[in-house]
Image (tube, grey):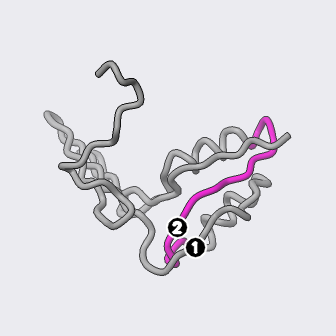
Amino acid sequence: MALVVVGSVAYDGVETPHGSVDRMLGGAATYISLAASYFTPVKLVGVVGDDFASEDAALLASRAIDLTGLERVPGSSILSTFTRTLSARVIELPSGPRLLSRTERQPRLDSSA
């Protein structure tokens, strides 16, 4: 039986005092799929932009991850930028129609809050 992983397949930009990378493969579903593929068949479900690199799709496919559920849509893939300084951490969240704004909150699952 295959594990179905549903989630973000994105790009990250990371900047630290030791160096930076403008764009690297990221997203929780990406790394869950890669790790799980060592133990069980994986089917990945997510949305990427038409700029999603063929090399990144090939990396996922090289681990026999089923990409049938990976949908390409017009526009850019999600890009999150993370900056780490010696004293603070700044995270810039991507904006777009598929994401919550910083003032919106996701509904809580437990009704006691």
| Residue under numbered circle 1 | 72
Find residue 29 and report its horizontal and vertical position in percent.
Answer: 57, 48
On-image quarter of the C terminus: top left
In terms of secondary structure, where does tag 1 sit? strand
Please, which residue is most extreme toward the front here? 111
- The crowding category of the residue bearing disc 1, from other C-alpha atoms within 10 Å (few below 14, some 14 to 19, many at least 20), is some
Residue 106 in the figure: left or right of residue 39 = left
Magenta residue span: 37-52
Question: What mark, if any, has residue 9 been given in the picture?
Answer: none
Please determine whether, in this image, residue 15 is positioned above or below residue 3. Answer: below
Find residue 24 and report its horizontal and vertical position in percent.
Answer: 46, 59
| Residue under numbered circle 2 | 48
Residue 59 in the figure: left or right of residue 7 = right
Q: Is residue 13 magenta?
A: no
On-image quarter of the N terminus: top right
Find residue 20 and report its horizontal and vertical position in percent.
Answer: 32, 55
Q: Is residue 50 magenta?
A: yes
In terms of secondary structure, where does tag 2 sit? strand
Quadrant of the image occupied by residue 88: top left
Please tell me which residue lies in front, 28 or 113. Answer: 113
Instruction: Determine the residue positioned at 47% across, 59% down.
Output: 10
Instruction: Determine the residue positioned at 50% across, 53% down.
Output: 8
Residue 16 in the figure: left or right of residue 74 = left
- The crowding category of the residue bearing disc 2, from other C-alpha atoms within 10 Å (few below 14, some 14 to 19, many at least 20), is many
